[in-house]
Image (cartoon, rainbow, N blue to C red):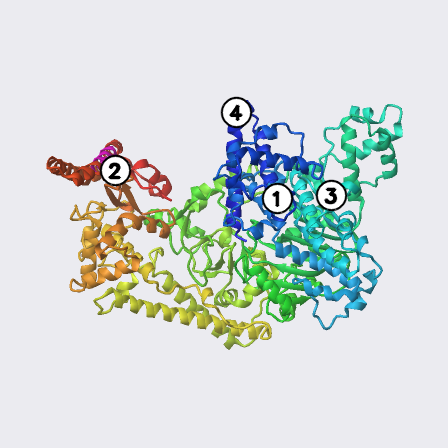
Amino acid sequence: MNRNSIKRFANDARRELLQKIENKAKQIEITDAAIIEETAYKWFIRIIALRFMEMNGLLPEKVFDNINNSSKHTLKKTIFRNCDELHPYFPSLFSKDETYLKSLFPEELLNEQSFITKLTDPLIIPDELMSRVEIIGWLYQYFFAEEKEHVIKAKKKYTTAEIPYATQVFTPDWIVRYMVQNTLGRYWIESHPEHRDLIANWEFYIENQDDEVRFEQNLEPYIDQKIRIEEIKCFDPAMGSGHILVYMFDVLYEIYCRCGYNKQEIPRLIIEYNLYGVDIDDRVYDVAVFLLTMKAMQYDKNFLTTAVQDGLKMNLVSMQETNHVTHEDITCFVGEKNERAFLEIENFINQYINAKTFGSLLQIDSVDFDFLKQNYEGLRQSKTKLAKLMPALLKQAQIFQNKYDVLVTNPPYIGNRYLNSDLSNYIETFYPLGKKDLFAAFMLAGFKKVKKYGLLGFMTPYVWMFISSFEGLRSHIMYKKDISTLIQLEYSGFDGATVPVCTFTLRNYKAGIPGQYINLAEFKGVNNQPLKTLKAVKNPKVDYRYSVNADIFKKIQGHPLSFWAGKQAIHVIENAEKLETIAKARVGLQTSDNQRFLRLWHEVDFQKIGFGMKDRSEARESKLKWFPYNKGGEYRKWYGNQFYVVNWEDDGREIREFNTYLNASRDSKIGIANTEFYFKESVTWSFVSSSYFGVRYSEKGFLFDTGGSSAFVDGELIYYVTAFLCSKLAYEFLRIQNPTLNFQPGNIANLPFVIPEDQAVVGEIIRLAKENIAISKNEWDSYETSWDFRVHPLLKFKGEEKTIERAFENWKRHSQKMFSTLKLNEEKINKLFIDIYDLGNEYTAEVKDENVTVRQANVEREMKAFISYAVGCMFGRYSLDEVGLVYVGGGGKFDETRYKTYMVADDNIVPILSKGNFGNGIFTRFVEFIKITFGEETLTENLEFIASAIGVKKGENPKDSLRRYFLQDFFKDHLKVYKKRPIYWLFTSGKHRVFNCLVYVHRYDADTLARIRDDYLHDQLGLLEREKSSLHKMMDSGSVKAEKELKVLKMKIEELEKYNQQLHELAEQQIEIDLDDGIVVNYGKFGGLVAQIK
């Protein structure tokens, strides 16, 4: 199924309907937006329903098949007639009450390019797909996709009306099949093992293959072998469009057939006796009723007719609430003298206040149905509001009073921060273990609604399996239920949800039977999930399927469901000493305003950064403002991620004052913590990771952030601890104890930690750690984002080479050697720790290439970095006569004598133009740089190599390519490398890029704008004026080409003149910048003169 195509179709249909119905509404003076919205939806769902029935031969006539051959009038009459004829069967979906519906039907919907025409196009929605029941659910969901996105992006507490938009998700078909087969299917097979042959049809049915478990004896107390199929009640408490119920129908039909029932009777039996569903959304309820009826008609095409004739009882409801029922309404309904009836009905009515908010979470007291029905029957002729509402209330009360054998659902997901107060308070009162998310409350409600020995199936976010907020829920399940099967999907394995999910089935009792777990975490892609699940179902020996008794989870602190953990690993976690005995893991500084107090190190005056401070006293005495700051970052091991500096001037005076101000209005005091560890040598890591555990050694001189929490160890053991935390075992222990990839100090402190008695082993681990740190630092310092960058690798590894290609090969060999050595060292460390912990039977020492975090040489990246280095030399940030940073601000005099080999731009301006109008333009300077560094005789070859690496377009020569790169792409790449905090600022005239130049922020002064205007822009303007005169002369000679060129040239001159005026206005202001304010503030002072930061 091409869901993108379906989604696009539904979105386009919605927009078309809204626009055309709005136009029609204006003609008849209807302006109510709600009516237009409702009309658009109703015509969409009706037309979809009609098309589905047509495709399945369920209509007495063709409606859309001859759409191109029918007149609009005829087609419109046919649509209306079929809607009217379906009203008795689907009174809500095809209602006749809304008189405006037909009036607002726009004839334009019958045009060739309308959504109705597209609906019949098999290239958009294939006929085979349009004939499947689930297509209605997909189209329904996608019709409201934009509204759903709008509601979710608002990031506020959801109103009752918004809850359906925010939560309705169409469950993937394979997950529905898995859940139903392993609940309803299992429930029947365990009661009736003589029907095991049915399993052959259930491809996702997971057999328990544990040879050590005696299933029949364990299950015997919980199995009712006498139960009949029509006695089994199946429930979906958040049914949506009924997808789960529809597949339950299929499985039930198979069982009925296997039991020998008359096939003509089965559909009615299933609907009246087996299937129950609830939702809070009236519209989706209509869809569910329709789909379940359509499913019945697949088995019996006369079902619709006979159902109406015989009076079908369908056990689906859309929750109705009684918020607007008043005391007077009840009195009017029952009369004033019948006091008992009044009290009974009042109590009954009050239970349904906010029912559309609480949905299936609603707790209903025991109901005297006989009394209520008796009173209702006597008063049903009443015209009162309550008389009309009572049948629906009685029906939903009955459904809520039932106990179910099987419950399967994909419940709504809403975190507690987005729950409105009514819903939040209700959950807190009745489902306290589920208060962190609506789905958890639904799980708990499900346990109550299912019989003592029933089965349940869910699809939910998988956070409940691991994080501390759901520990109570996990304990409840561990001690009172059995997880029979569970599938953990890959992080983005379900594209319908914005969170990672799992799907699982449970027994509502504790039989002590091991659960079957399938871990799809390593298999990326939505389409991969069912394929890998099927493989695990067929072959229990695959390495991502596990048979686990839940009692083992009790041995892990917090009881996470780390089902992949080996028994020995859990034994180690349970019994070994903890890392906290040797290392102090601490959370760091929370500035409460990072924009104010943090900078990337390249933003500020380098002379104001205090490197290598041993403690707070030394930092304070230095009188410096900025100090290195560990703030986590992307996955990287051993060394690096040193990007930030923090304002800790005068022992953090400004941060302390700001923190005091904030804490005055807070209940808890947060912000400045563990200051005694500031500037100490440490092991640091990223608090949040999207992949693995990135741990790095940090020399003295750093403060640290909550996102870059740190551990502190005395002496040489810091290298042993670094090696352990960088090892595979540390990551695996963390995954077992906290699989959420949020690595808090408490998680690190709780790691099992062993120092072997053999000091030779300890010494070897320390040696390897030191070597790995050195390799990683060497690689980190090879790029100019490091403050210890010395010289570009192409020059460092140039040797006697004259070509950049050979210099690159030298650097490539070196980087590959560093990579291989680091990988080998990591595997040695893994092997040593695996032996120390005696985990050789559960883990291997192997390290995947993707987990080695030093970069191997990449020709495109290296050539772009070399160009950036050359630009740095043009401005004097670097020099070919010295290594490292040369000029990085500080207000000191710029010393041109430090640049003898390659001359810098003495005015701090480097033009970028499409043509070589200036002898000191960036391309000319770059060519000179290549000549000086690699020689003139290989210049052409070197330019070709660089151009080829960064990309040559068709018809370009290498020089054209490089000019285009400087003009169009250099600044984009510069923004990426410098994290949208550029140090080379791009002044540009606008859309046509008639004039562009770079300025180095650390050499900017108040006269820079005037120099740009007087020395460069005016020359460019004069050049264009002369070109204009030349074109006028050519036009006088009758040149058509000259006329076209002149038109373009005039736009360029106009752009340049406008830019000249803007430049003049700002140049006169003599704008000063303060590097301490950061790039964002300073860059923003130049408004329309500089390129946007994107």
Q: CA distance from mark 2 to mark 4?
A: 59 Å
The picture places residue 435, in percent across and down from the top left corner, at 67, 45
The secondary structure that dominates the magenta segment is helix
State the SS at label 4: helix
User: Which residue type does callout 3 highlight?
Assistant: Thr
Q: CA distance from mark 3 to mark 4?
A: 40 Å
Residue 99 or 955: which is nearer the viewer?
99
Disc 3: CA contacts within 10 A as few (<14), some (14-19) or many (>=20): few
Q: Which residues are magenta?
A: 1049-1059
Q: CA distance from mark 1 to mark 2?
A: 56 Å
Disc 4: CA contacts within 10 A as few (<14), some (14-19) or many (>=20): few
Residue 305 is tagged as 3
The picture places residue 986, in percent across and down from the top left corner, at 29, 44
Residue 989 is tagged as none
- Badge nearest the viewer, 3 or 2: 3
Question: Between disc 4 and disc 1, whose residue precedes?
Answer: 4
Inspect the magenta stretch and tell me whether residue 1051 lies in it.
yes
Residue 167 is tagged as 1
State the SS at label 1: helix
Inspect this view and state whether residue 558 appears: no
Q: CA distance from mark 4 to mark 1?
A: 33 Å
Residue 26 is tagged as 4
Question: Between disc 1 and disc 2, whose residue precedes?
Answer: 1
Q: CA distance from mark 1 to mark 3?
A: 35 Å
Question: Between disc 2 and disc 4, whose residue precedes?
Answer: 4
- Badge nearest the viewer, 1 or 3: 3
User: Which residue type does callout 2 highlight?
Assistant: Ala
State the SS at label 2: loop
The picture places residue 794, in percent across and down from the top left corner, at 28, 63
Disc 1: CA contacts within 10 A as few (<14), some (14-19) or many (>=20): some
